[in-house]
Image (spheres, rainbow, N blue to C red):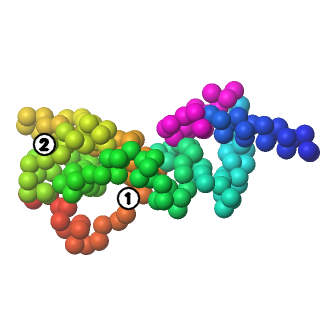
Amino acid sequence: MPLQDGLIEENAAFVEMLLFLESSPQPIESLSRASGLSADDVEDALGVLRERYGSPASGLELSFIANGYVLTPKREHWEKVKERYGKKNDGKLSRSALETLTIIAYKQPITRAEIEAIRGAPPDNMIRLLVERQLVREVGKKDAPGRPTLFGTTGEFLRFFRLNSISELPKLDDSEEERFKLAR
């Protein structure tokens, strides 16, 4: 059995190296292709890494974000060093941009006119900013006169907010739900 444990540790070291080299979350299939290991072997290796990075002695954690695995700083440590090592504007969105992003996240797919009806202000500049930051993208055209563009969130949105899927967004309370209803 020690031979088996050594192989799992070796596989874990290789998967760890791949995660270190990749900056975006990697699904098991991608790790399997890059490593030449089976999906089961990758899952075993991730189990070893989960245990290793779960230790209080580690400054990193194995995170599952946007349907993939990535090495990230532990949140409690990141708060202490993010000013020095974080991108200066990474966490900063204006109130208007955040409000527009919230509307899109909860009501997607949604048009500019629908966003404006909820916000009470034109969203054009905010949408442009959110598209530039790759948090929002065009997801299609609405089957309505003029075929207006529909907007939705991106994988970068999920990574930015450390979500695996939109279903992990906090639930709206009744007053928030009422505010997000479209005026008809």
Q: Amino acid at mark 1?
A: Leu
**Residue 99 location, quadrant:** bottom left
Q: Residues within 10 Å of mark 1 (few under 14, many from 20)?
A: some
> Which is nearer the N-term, disc 2 or disc 1?
2
- Separation of residues labelled 2 and 1 (CA atoms): 24 Å
Residue 113 versus residue 77 in the image, above or below: above
Tell me the mark number nearer the camera, choosing from 2 and 1. 2
In the image, taking residue 129 as reference, residue 113 lies left or right, namely: left
Answer whether labels 2 and 1 touch (C-beta < 8 Å). no
Q: Is residue 126 left or right of residue 13?
A: left
Magenta-colored span: 19-36
Q: Quadrant of the C terminus?
A: bottom left
Foreground of the two, 164 or 88: 88
Which residue type carries mark 2? Asp
Most foreground residue, 97 or 81: 81
Query: Dividing the picture into quarters, in which one does residue 44 lie?
Result: top right
Looking at the rendered structure, which numbered label has been put on residue 124?
Answer: 2
Q: Secondary structure at mark 2?
A: helix
Q: What residue lies at 51% left-to-right and 40% top-to-bottom? A: 25
In this view, the residue farthest toward the bottom is 174
Q: Please check the rendered image and state whether residue 39 is part of the magenta-colored stretch, yes or no.
A: no
Most common secondary structure along the magenta stretch: helix
Whether residue 40 appears in this view of the structure is no
Can you tell which mark lies on residue 169?
A: 1
